[in-house]
């Protein structure tokens, strides 16, 4: 009996090293990392006409956990934020590297860092771990959002170290379904005050009976003052219809 292709690859040991290509051109350890990201909680990023917004699902499953400790929107600098899906311990290490780079830029040049330089550093680090032996790939995908010269920007990086700019995007569990809704319903430029209920409405459609406003973490950065503002918990109830 013929084995499925994936099982054949495993039997032949092509998934034992991050740097070993399978005969059909796949890095199987990187693809396993992608599956880890798909298991992580979702985040939606939207570029608005007056700023940029990230709405992230904290997915708190244990009532013993203090909700304020489960942040899914990370501050890289006052004008720059990130959200991640997958192994959040991997995300923490990469976020801290981004924070150091942002502060070095302020000290060296006396100016806030461009968002693209942060996503490029994170993507370079992730790509490195698909190329060298002795270490596994990072099991995390990122949304990086910020403002540069009063222009809101949103970037996404995947497990391979590839990154692109987006008008709106989603990572994590149900990401394909969320992106289909974004393609269907995102019409024109929203304000930040419009984007938050729009994203929460998508989560309500996707999560159905599991939707709970207490599980969301929202970050928004205005193009005018380039300052991160966080909203969560009961403060989000006004955005839910």
Image: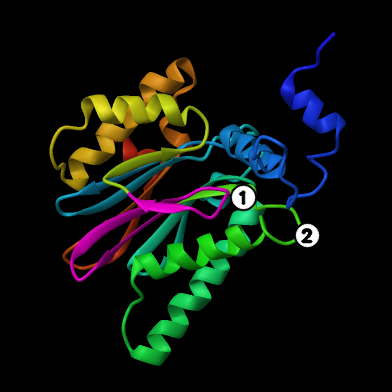
Q: How many marks?
A: 2
| Secondary structure of residue under mark 2 | loop
Which residue ends up furthest to the top in the rendered image?
Answer: 1
* Residue 72 visible in the shown view: no
Residue topped by disc 2: 133
Does residue 108 appear left or right of residue 127 in this picture?
Answer: left
- Would residue 17 be counted in the magenta stretch? no
Classed neighbour count for the residue bearing mark 2: other residues with Cα under 10 Å, few (<14), some (14–19), many (≥20): few
Give the image location of residue 109, x and y in percent. 35, 89
Q: Quadrant of the C terminus?
A: top left
Give the image location of residue 143, x and y in percent. 43, 50
Residue topped by disc 1: 88
Quick check: 171 above or below 144?
above
Does residue 88 appear left or right of residue 170 in this picture?
Answer: right
Camera-nearest residue between 160 and 80: 160
| Main SS of residues in magenta | strand
Give the image location of residue 26, x and y in percent. 65, 39
Classed neighbour count for the residue bearing mark 1: other residues with Cα under 10 Å, few (<14), some (14–19), many (≥20): some
């Amino acid at each position: 009996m013929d084995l499925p292709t994936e099982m054949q690859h495993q039997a032949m040991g092509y998934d034992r090293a991050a740097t070993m290509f399978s005969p059909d051109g796949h890095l199987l350890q990187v693809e396993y990392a992608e599956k880890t990201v798909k298991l992580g909680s979702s985040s939606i990023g939207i570029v608005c006409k007056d700023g940029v917004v990230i709405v992230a699902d904290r997915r708190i499953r244990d009532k013993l956990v203090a909700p304020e400790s489960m942040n899914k929107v990370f501050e890289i600098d006052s004008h720059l934020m990130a959200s991640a899906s997958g192994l959040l311990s991997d995300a923490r290490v990469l976020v801290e590297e981004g924070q150091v780079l942002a502060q070095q830029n302020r000290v060296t040049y006396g100016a806030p860092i461009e968002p693209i330089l942060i996503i490029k550093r994170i993507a370079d680090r992730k790509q490195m771990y698909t190329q060298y032996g002795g270490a596994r790939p990072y099991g995390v995908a990122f949304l990086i959002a910020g403002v540069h010269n009063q222009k809101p920007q949103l970037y996404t990086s995947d497990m391979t170290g590839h990154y692109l700019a987006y008008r709106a995007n989603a990572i994590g569990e149900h990401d394909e379904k969320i992106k289909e809704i974004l393609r269907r319903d995102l019409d024109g430029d929203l304000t930040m005050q419009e984007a938050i209920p729009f994203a929460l409405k998508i989560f309500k459609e996707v999560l159905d009976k599991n939707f709970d406003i207490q599980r969301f973490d929202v970050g928004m950065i205005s193009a005018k003052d380039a300052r991160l503002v966080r909203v969560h918990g009961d403060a989000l109830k006004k955005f839910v219809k």
